[in-house]
Amino acid sequence: MSVPTTTAEYRVEGKANDFSNMKYNSSAQIPKLGDHDCLVKIEAVSLNYRDLIIPKGMYPFPMKPNVVPCSDGAGTIVSVGPRVTRFKPGDSVCTLFNQAHMGGPMTPSIIGTGVGGAVDGTLRQYAAYEESGLVAKPKNLSAIEASTLPCAALTAWNALYGLEGKQLKPGDTVLTQGTGGVSIFALQFAVAAGARVIATTSSEEKGKKLKELGAHAVINYRTDEKWGETAKKLSGDGEGVHHVIEVGGNTTMPQSLQAVRMDGLISIVGFLGGGPKDGSAPPTMVDALMHLCTVRGLLVGNRQQFEEMNAAITANGVKPVVDEKVFPFEKAKDAFQYQWEQKHFGKLCIEVK
């Protein structure tokens, strides 16, 4: 197989409200591989909320100018540097979100290695990454399915298993919010572990899909404004849930605090909702004391967790939930808009050919 010297790619130039600043180049040069680099033929990319807010100039973490967007990708290695030992041409891999996060806690230097933000991302046909920044693809998943793992799946896994002493146990109750990627992966991982899941959503149709995925109870947050109190009542013993996967931020946090049990864990993984809708002040850190719970912010996860998660995915036959609409590479901007309008269910993917 000949090694390409150019690649088609998108780059974010400045910021815009309509993704028009995502500029396409059909023949960008591929730099020479370093000693420990692998050249990956990207076959599929999945989108996250983070990918949408980077072109809009709303992302709070480090970024490089004119970055190739998207953190999540899966593909096949076509060439390796002379000192690569972990992979060989023909191996199927996924990208690691923070390229320097091999294990242990997050550090400021690790945050500066985020793919699609501080480091060029996956929205291109070919991409070179150090071998340490790649993870073997689970054998039971297609490239499209595997492309959903680097951010949403690993974030959900870290939320459930990443804090020592608070790891998910069989019989625990988990509260998830909505039908985005992190929430659905958390539901799937929790069900596979023998936990109970209470899920919130905004429609009966989505509620039926959540039940099909194994949710034990579904609450419509549009018709039940006190859904946190309802979740507490539904938590088996009525004392509250053990884990909350908090994706809304200040908007949903008040109800998450109502739902969590004493000594429970709220994992804040996003801020989709903005501020409280009723104009009230958002919760403060003192609220964690008042509810006697742990509140933890986290940013995806490390390579060791990724590999442990992949082993669980393979052993339990977990299949990522991918939206029925898969966009071609040439229509990537349309995919961004589709997800921005929240038309998707589960993970939205782009097929790269």
Image (cartoon, grey):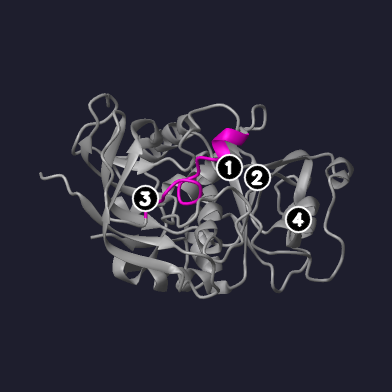
Q: Is residue 114 magenta?
A: yes
Q: Where residue 180 appears, x then y in whole percent?
A: 53, 60
Q: Where residue 204 appears, x then y in whole percent?
A: 57, 73
- CB-based contact (under 8 Å), mark 4 and mark 2: no
Residue positioned 73% across, 60% down in the render:
252
Magenta region, residue range: 108-122
Above or below, comparing residue 20 to residue 232 in the picture = below
Label 2, on which residue? 173
Q: Nearer the viewer, mark 3 or mark 4?
A: 3
Residue positioned 53% across, 69% down in the render:
206
Give the mark, 3 or 2, whose residue is nearer the N terminus: 3
Return the mark for residue 195.
1
Where residue 83 sits, quadrant-wise, is: top left
- CB-based contact (under 8 Å), mark 1 and mark 2: yes
Residue positioned 56% across, 66% down in the render:
56
Q: CA distance from mark 3 to mark 1?
A: 29 Å
Label 1: how many residues lie within 10 Å, few (<14), some (14-19) or many (20+)?
many
Where residue 128 sits, quadrant-wise, is: top left
Give the mark, 3 or 1, whose residue is nearer the N terminus: 3
Identify which amino acid the numbered label 2 is placed on: Thr
